[in-house]
Amino acid sequence: MPGPKDLDPSSSPRAFLGAELRHAREKAGLSQEELGQRLFVSGSFIGQLESGTRRMQPEYARLLDEVLGTGDFFQRNCRAVAKSKYPEHFSEAAEAEAHATAIRQYTPLLIPGLLQTAAYARAVCRAYQPTAPEQVIEELVAARVERARILDDPTEPLLWAVVDEAALHRVTGGPEVMAEALGHIAGLIRQGRVIVQVLPFDAGAHAAMEGSIKLMDFDGAPPLVYFEGVGTGRLEDDPAVVRHQRFTYELLTASALSREISLARIEGMAQDYAHEEHL
């Protein structure tokens, strides 16, 4: 039986590499759990690599080549997969997001990336990197807008966002940008494409006051949760951690406004911003 082929850059790199990993593992007579034990990771982590949900990192590629006897195949080919248009701390999460069947997200201080307009994204990226060349900012904005194209599909993924009222009041890019941004969200809601709930100030203390939450579910792979800070982020697949974050998210939805009232709040604030820009 021929060995693994070199990665074809014109194919889907992560899917190809995942299929080759599955082939090599089965050829070695190992289950996902058994291979995971040899790499000191979970069997579900191996499953996520094989399904293309997670990107193969160089340290795991080296171990896989050693354990599976594949020479330097995974080390060579994971370098092609590592190329990303997203910031390093977010690239793996962005790639996983594109494969998700459901995304549940809470954001305390800004509109979630998948719901942002180009103008809003531009204001956010410029705030993050005030001295960056314009080309760098435009590349980041283009990548963010491209991410949002997963919402062009009428059914998947399910996007359920809980947005803190603080994010609606933080005037990012000016009143005109905010009017467009909130109008865009309202349009997606009215199209039945997304579920958005506003977590109001008068909800008081809540379960996620320390930060944001992003939960992702997949077909044929375990769920993930993404934790993000300033310039840093990590994916977590530990079932206990995912369960806890899912429960936290459910508490947030219970404290948030209903979908109908949230839509009215968003549309009302969009009108207020539009009126303000003409004053």
Image (cartoon, rainbow, N blue to C red):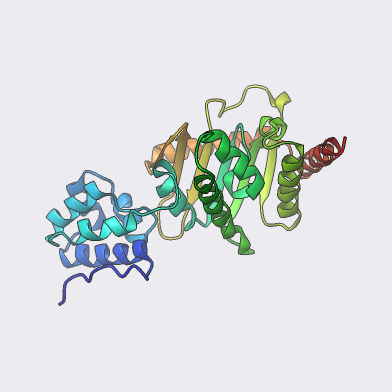
Q: Nearer the viewer, residue 141 or 107?
A: 141
Residue at 15% x, 63% y is 28
Side (left or right) of 260 relative to 127: right
Q: Nearer the viewer, residue 183 or 195?
A: 183
Q: Is residue 71 above or below residue 123?
A: below
> Residue 218: percent from the left, percent from the top?
46, 56
Q: Is residue 131 above or below residue 46?
A: above
Residue 144 percent across, percent down from the top left = 55, 50
Q: Based on the displayed image, in which of its 4 quarters is residue 225 positioned? A: top left
In the rendered image, the residue lying farthest to the top is: 205
State the image coordinates of residue 128 (x, y, percent, origin top left).
53, 34
Closer to the camera in the image, 89 or 224: 89
Where is residue 175 drawn, in percent x and y?
Answer: 76, 37
User: Can residue 252 be seen by looking at this rendering?
Assistant: yes
Image: 165 above or below 235: above
The N terminus appears in which quarter of the rendering?
Answer: bottom left
Q: Nearer the viewer, residue 119 or 64?
A: 119
Q: Residue at x 68, y 37 (%)?
A: 173
Residue occupying image coordinates x 57% and y 26%: 209
Q: Is residue 36 visible?
A: no
**Relative height, residue 133 to residue 30 (above, below):** above
- Give the left or right position of residue 140, taking residue 233 as reference: right
Image quadrant where one finds the C terminus: top right
